[in-house]
Image (cartoon, coloured by chain):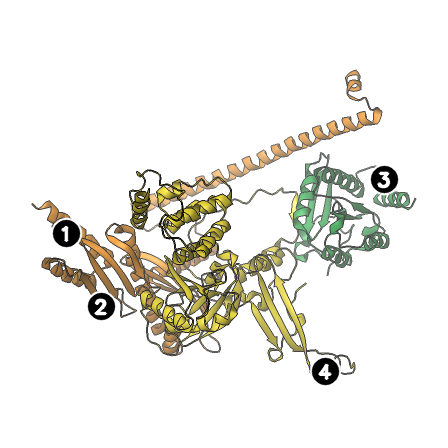
Chain colours: A yellow, B green, C orange
Amino acid sequence: MRGFLDTHRTGQAVALGEDQRPVPLRKHAPGLGDFIMDETVAEYIRRTVLKIPRDEIKTMLQKWGFLSEAQLQTINFHQLKDNISQDVVQLCEENSADIKQAAVLDIIYNYIYPNKRVWSVYQMNKTGEETDFFDLTDFKKKIKRRLRSALKNVTITFREYEDNAVWIRIAWGTPYTKPNQYKTSYVVYHSQTPYVFISASVLKSNLPLLCQALVVASNYHDIREMELRSHSLNSLKDIVFKRYSQNFQTYYPKPLRERDVAPETDLRIIQENKNEKERIERVNREIFGDGPQPKLEFAQYKLETMFKSDPKMDVLDKKEPFRCLVKFSSPHLLESLKSLAPAGMADAPLSPLLTCIPQKARNYFKIREKKGLFPGSFVSP
Amino acid sequence: MAVLRPFDKLPALNSAVLLLVSSDEGLQQKLAEAILREKKNFKINIHLATSLPLPSERDHLRPRIDMIVFMIDIKSKYSLKNVEASLAYVDASFFLGKVCFLVTGVGRVNCCSIEMNAIWKLGEIYSSPVLFCELEMEGIRVATAQRLLRMLQICAGHIPGVSALSFGSLMRSSAND
Amino acid sequence: MEEGKAYSPDGVFAHLEMLEARAHEAAVKQEETEQQEEKLARLKARAQELRFQRDELRAKVELQEKGQLGKGGVVSDPAQPSARAVLEWKIKSVEATLQVFYLTGISGKLTKRGVCFCISTAYEGTYLDSYCLDLLIKPEVQIHRHSVPVFIPLEQIAKKYLQTDIRRFLSVLSDHLNAYAGRRYQADQLQEHFSDQIEGTLQRNSLCNLLVFSYNVSSKSKTFPFKVRLLYGDLCCSLPTEVVVSCAPDAPVSLAETAAAHSDLFRRVALHKAFRSFSSADESVDGAP
C-alpha cells in the first residue's frame, strides 16, 4: 500500500499514462508516515470547492491540473457538494498539496467568476517615452520582492492567461502572523498598459503597498484610482481599452448582413409617431452605437453647487454649497440608459453627463459650481 | 399645435378609425391586435400614438378619427401625466361620447401607484366613461376588445338610432345610479 | 335544441353563454381566414410585381451585354436615363470609390465636427484589424475618441505630429499599428500551426515586442530544445532587432551551427515562415538517405 501511494505521488507531476493504472486507494490511514497536509490548506481547498457550482467542479479541477485524471475519476460528482469537497481534500492530501496549489485553484475560480468581486480601475503614469519590453519573469520577481520585503508573510500567486493578462492573488499577513487566505486581493494586469484592475481585500491598509509594488514592477511612476468600478471585469476592460462599440463614421465596408425581413405588421395598424421614433433611434445609435454596452451597476454624481434662488426670497441663500448625491443603479446601467428614450421615459438625446460614462471611463462624478451645471439640468423625467 | 377635431374630415364609407393613446407601446400593440382579431362587418384602422398632439406632417394622411381611447397604466404615474397633458389637444366636441379612459393593470392593485380618485375625477371632468381592465389576461383582453369595438361602432354611426352622445349619457346615468 | 339541453344543466343563461362563446369562436375563425385570404392576395400581387421587376432588369442586362459585344463598350441607351438616375449613379460610384480607399490602409470621412479616420492593417497580403480615430478640427486638431489599443504610444505620436503634420501623424500611427498587427499575426500563426514543435507556452506581451519560447530540434534521432528570445526594438517593424537562440550546453556542436542559422532566419523572415522552412528542411533531410 505504501508503494502504491508513492508511485502515485511521483506520477502526478507528469500526469500522463495514468488512465491505465488501477484506481488508487482513496482512503488511507493517517499516520503512515505520509506528509500531513496543513489543516488550513485542507479547509481552504474544501471551501473553494464548495463555492463552485456542482456541475462545474470537474472541469475546474481539470483546469487546475493538480489531481490526475485517474484521481478525478474516483470522485463521484453526483453526490452532495459537501461530500465531493471531502473527497477532493482527501486526494489533495495524497498529493500533499500546499497553499500554493490551493491558491491556484482560487485564481481559477475567480477567473471564471470575476463578477463575484468588485473591481476598481487604477491608472498609472510615466514621464519618459522609453518603450518597455515587459518581461513577465522580471515583473513577477519585482512584485514578490517588494511585497515580501515589507511583510514577511504573504502568499503571492501568479497565473497568466492567453489575452496577455496576468492574474495576481495576494493573501496578506504581517511579519508576525500568517497570511489570511480568506481576505485576498486580486490584481489583473495586461502587460504594457497603464491600467490595473484591482479587487482589493477587506484589509485596506495594504493597498498603498500593493500599488507601489505594481508601479515599480511595471516601470511606471505613479498610480491613481480612476473612479470606475463594477462587478464586471470584462466591461471595465472594454471601457478602458476602448473596445466597446463606439459607432465610428467611416466608409469602411460593414460586413454584409442578411437583411432581416421586418415582421409583417398589420396594415390596419398605423404608427403615428413613426418619424419621432426613427429620430430617437438614430440619435440613440449615434450615442450608444450598435453593439452591447459595457456592464456597470451604478453611476454616482455628487453635487456641490450653490443653491440659486430669488435674491428677494431669503430662503437658503447662503454661501454654503447645496450638497446632494444622485445615484443611478441598475443591473445593467448603460443598457437601461440606452433604452430610456426608446421607451418614452426620457428625451433623446440624453444628457451628456449620463452618456459620457464609457468615454470618460468613470462612473463616480463630482459636479462643482465652476462648470455651470445645476442639478435640474440633467435629470430627465 | 393642432387640436384634434371629430368632424373636420369626411367619413369614409363603411369604416371606422380608432386612436389609441398610450405611453406603453407593447400593451397598446397587444390591444390593437386583439381588436383586429374580432369579427366585424366594417373596415377598421387603428392609429397608435404615444401622446397628443399628433405629428402635423401626417395630418393630410390621417382619416377622420371616430373615437379616442386613452390608456392609463395603474402602475405608472407617468402614464396618467401623459394622458392629462394630451387631453389639452382634444377638441371639446370629442367629449360628447367619443372619448374613453381605459385603466390597465387592474389585476395588480398592490403595485398601484395612481390614486383611484384621480382617475374618477378625470372621468367626471371630461364626462367620459372609465373602463377598467387587465390586458395581460387573455380573457379580459378579448372582452375589452369587444367592448371597445362596440363603442367604436356607435361612435362611427354604424348603429342606427344610437348616437355617441346618447350612448354616453346612457352610460353616465347608469353609473350614477 | 335537444342536444343543447343535454349540455346545459345550469339553466338558460349558462346555455346562452356557451352559445355566445361558440359563436364568438366561429366568428374569430372566420375573421382569421378572411385576413389570411387578404394577405395571400396581397403577397401574390407583390410577388407579381417583383417578378415583373426582375424581368425588366434581366432584359436590361441582356441588352447591355449585346451592346458591349457588338460595339465594344459604347452603349447607345434606347431610353436616355433621367438626370436624377445619372446623379444617383454618380453618387453610388463615388461612394464605392471612397469605400475602396480602405484597401489603401487609411481612409477618412467628414463628420459634423471634424473627420473620422480609419486605419486598416494588413500583413503580407492578409487584412487584419482596423482602428478608428475621431478627430475634432476646431479650435485645434484633437483626438475626440479612438479605438487604438492602449499600449500603442498614441499620445506620444500625437504630441509630435498632430498639430503640425497630420499626414505624418497618420502614417506614423499606421506604421505602428501595422507593425503591431504583423507581430501579433506571426505569433498567432506560430501558435496555431506549430504548437506541436513548441514546448510549453509562447510568452509574449501586449505589444508583441518580446517573444520567448522554446522549440524542439531533432538531430540524430534525438531532440534538443532551443530557447528563443526575440526582441523587436523598432516598434514600426515586424521583424526582430535582437534574436537569441540558445541550446543546452550538452548539445552536439553541429546544433550550435543550426542555432546560428535559425537565428539568422528569424531576423530576416516572418516567424511562421521560418518555422515552415525548418519543417520542410527536416523532411528533405529525413527523406535523403
Name the N-terminal-most of marks 1 and 2: 2
Disc on res. B162: 3
Q: Nearer the viewer, residue A58 or C84?
A: A58
Q: Amino acid at mark 4?
A: Lys
Q: Amino acid at mark 1?
A: Ala
Real-space Cα separation, disc 2 to disc 3, in angstroms: 96 Å
Relative to C263, A285 lies left or right:
right
Real-space Cα separation, disc 1 to disc 4, in angstroms: 86 Å
Q: Nearer the viewer, residue A17 or B146?
A: A17
Chain for disc number 1? C
Q: Is residue B125 above or below residue C109?
A: above
Disc on res. C281: 1
Q: Nearer the viewer, residue A27 or A47?
A: A27
Q: Are marks 4 and 2 in contact (CB under 8 Å)?
A: no
> From the viewer's perspective, is the residue at label 4 or at label 3 nearer?
4
Q: Residues within 10 Å of mark 2 (few under 14, many from 20)?
A: some
- Looking at the rendered structure, the number of numbered marks drawn on it comes to 4
Q: Residues within 10 Å of mark 3 (few under 14, many from 20)?
A: some
**Residue B49: percent from left, percent from top:** 69, 52
Q: Residue at x 73, y 45 (%)?
A: B18
Q: Are marks 3 and 1 in contact (CB under 8 Å)?
A: no
**Residue A375: percent from left, percent from top:** 66, 72
Chain for disc number 3? B
User: Where is mark 2, residue-wise?
Assistant: C242
User: Where is mark 4, residue-wise?
Assistant: A318
